[in-house]
Amino acid sequence: MSPVRIVRPRAFLLASAALTSLAALDPPGALAQQAREPLPPVEVTPAQSRKQARPAGREAQGPRRAAARRPAAASVAPKPVVPTAAAQTPLNTNAVAESASRLGLTVRETPATVEVISAATMREQGYRTVSDVAQGAVGVTAGDNPAEPSAFSMRGFTNSQINTLYNGIKIGPQNMTSRITDTANLEAVEFLKGPASLMSGEGAAGGAINFVTKQPHTGPIRNEADFSWDSLNSFRAHYGSGGSTNVQGLDYRFDVSRSSLNGFADDTNTKTLDVSGQLNYRISDSLKVWGAIEYREDRSKAYWGAPLVPIAFSGSHATTGIVSGNYISNYNKTNLGAVTIDDRTFNTNYNVLDNRNVAQEVWLRGGFELKLAPDLTLKSQAYGYGAERTWFNNEVEAFNSGTNMVDRERFYVAHSQRLVGNVTDLIWDANIAGLDNRLVTTLSSSYLDFVRPGAANFPGDSVPLVDPPRGYYGLLTIQQQTARIDNEALSFEDRLKLTRSFALVGGLRVEHIGLDRNSTDKFGLEKANFPFSQSWAPTTGRIGYTWEAVPGLTFFSQYATGADIAANNIFLLNPTDPLNLTTARTYETGVKHLFWDNRAEWSFSAYDILRKNVYAAAGGMQLKLAGRQESKGVELAASVRPIEPLRLWGNIAYVDARYADYNFVGGSFSGNTPPNVPRVVANAGASYRFFTPWAVEFGITGRHVGDRYNTDANTVTLKAYTVADVYAFVDIPKTVFNAVDQARLTFRVRNIADKHYAIWGDPFYPDQILLGAPRTYELSAAFKW
């Protein structure tokens, strides 16, 4: 999607140029406070580039650098500006998350809970994949490599109820289209909590997660290179470069990363390749064009979990603290009684030898930004996306208490996906009766073609629990499904400042979704009730306020709505499924506080979400009517640097998520908790830096995840766990490497206590549990020049 940023007034450009000189002279924190602008300035930038907003007025408590190339009135060629990061607050609330609002608002000015995890934080915390990033966010849990790296849980919602966006663009249901993604090419990951259909459309009942690639900057060319290796013999390498070219007004960014991440289970590995590049060309002060391309590839030897096993069978090999409960196999219907994870299966891979899990993705994006008038800006982005994905695995491992063997079943599916679309924004800054107002009108359209060959037969066998023969996939018979989806949406978003400190923020989205589906059997004959067509026209929106009661202390509240497909997801909707949309709404209120000369920050939010007309997987692959899903919770995050060497941070989230009116023939799940939703998630960390000639920092981070269930039936509990990582790094002086401006060596220990725990349970494969990674050691090096 195209970002929304307000065109910077000329007076502000002149002031920014002056402040650049002051920032170079004054020590940190010595700049005088500036006159607060009614709305944050917005640069001409390509789609969904996440930027750091300049502190304004009462928020300008620390140093800042002007990013403008020159004042608008200048007639001489601009001089390159050395790129410098804007002052990042402890919780990064000065960042502009454009997946949360098109108004160019910072996180602090948005009447919603938004979290932006920057590239700098990813490097410091050692987040290698987006799953790692999610697990460090407030109240978010995720699967992990080599388990389910594309699975997320947030505010009581999981999988296709959370939109995954790439530079603001949605490509389809998260649990089908998301892939393991390395963080090396990312500038930021944005988390928008709660119903978010205003920004990303159908599917965002629980929120949205946006991956933002690195963007060009104006100024001297800067290069960076990163390398790492761990005790599982995994490695990562990345090179990036960006800056201004010799062509006046032309800036570039290029990144390439390669990784090979080995899993703890036997014969598991994920290899990734990501190449991304972008050119920004400022033709004049009022016109900028840009283009971007990205190629991503991942190839995995996959792991699908450890089977639930009767305690009576495992005997001395039974474990405690990973799972508990009594279970009747969803696959073979045998009664396992009280279950455990057998310690002999911690590293066992039950997948077949010829398994593969492959994806290749290509992005093409381009657009322009044109200043039509001092108060009117037109922005447009066109995009194309193509993906080829294949799964060829044994995906079921179900213990059979009648034979004391593990029953297996094969699964094959492939995706051929093509998506084209356009997003156009018109941004109007106005003064209404003396009140500052910004209105963004957005028109978007897309067309998606999705072909899904899949298995028509599902070969299976049975193997011993311990040292199983891997075998091969066997006979494959293919059937095919198709989905063609067209989408058009018109949305409005507005911010009206009633006073200098109080603003109303609201928006409305009217959307049309058209679906054409077909399905054929292995002989190419159409199945019963196919083909069929269906269309929907949901209207969603948000209304809220922000109130800066005192400088740095902002209260907010919002009411927001969302919509998504009632049964599973729109790609797989069948004519016999309910062909209507669910509706979701949230009430939320909270506070964001930045104080102590920008050295301390905390935020708090409380929310109440209701989703109606829900279908869910009731202990397996059958969809049942769940009626309503209710989610209430609170989130608290804080970070402080009491003295320059010491940094402390932490967050905690509590959620009470339950089904209501979830009744079906033979039982009821009303009152039960949705799968993979812990009541409590907490993170904490501390670091201390010694400012010696070779600066050294030591740090520790801890994570606690409460009890969860793997199915709607709530019969098996994934037990709570607590893990911790430690790290130490040393910054090598430039005198050692003259050609390198910055060099850092880092040693990290993940899961230092070697905790065994369950990280995720797939409700469609409830007979097995995905385990977390054991203790690993990692050595990395990073260079900038």
Image: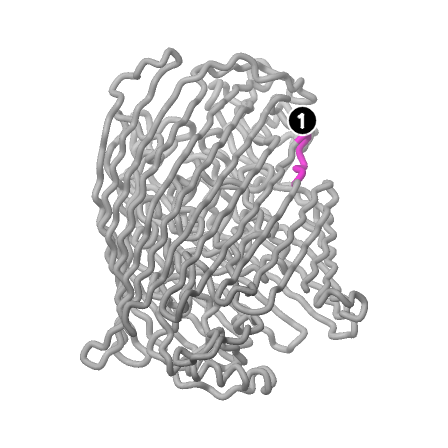
- The location of residue 479, given as percent across then percent down, is 40, 18
Compared across the picture, whether 130 is left or right of 590 comes to right
Q: Main secondary structure of the magenta part?
A: loop
Give, as a three-letter code, the residue at label 1.
Gly
Residue 118 horizontal side relative to residue 225, left or right:
left
Taking the spot 27% from the left edge, 75% from the top edge, the residue there is 497
Of 290 and 357, which appears nearest the observer?
290
Query: Is 586 located above or below residue 613 in the figure?
Result: below
- At label 1, counting other C-alpha atoms closer than 10 Å, the crowd grade (few under 14, some 14-19, many 20 or more) is few
| Residue 180, image x, y percentages | 54, 42
- Residue for point 41% across, 34% down: 417
Toward the right, the furthest residue is: 736
Does the magenta portion include 103? no
User: What percent of the width, then of the height, locates residue 685?
Assistant: 61, 62
Given residues 543 and 74, the one toward you in this image is: 74
Residue 504 visible here: no
Write down the region rendered in magenta: 261-267
Residue 532 placement (x, y as % from top left): 24, 26
Quadrant the C terminus occupies: bottom right
* Magenta span includes 266: yes
Residue toward you, 407 or 476: 476
> In the rendered image, which residue does mark 1 sit on?
315
**For this view, does 520 lie left or right of residue 359?**
left
Kindly state the secondary structure of the residue where label 1 is placed. helix
Identify the residue at image location x=54%, y=51%. 135
Q: Residue 371, can we see it? A: yes
Colour logic:
one colour
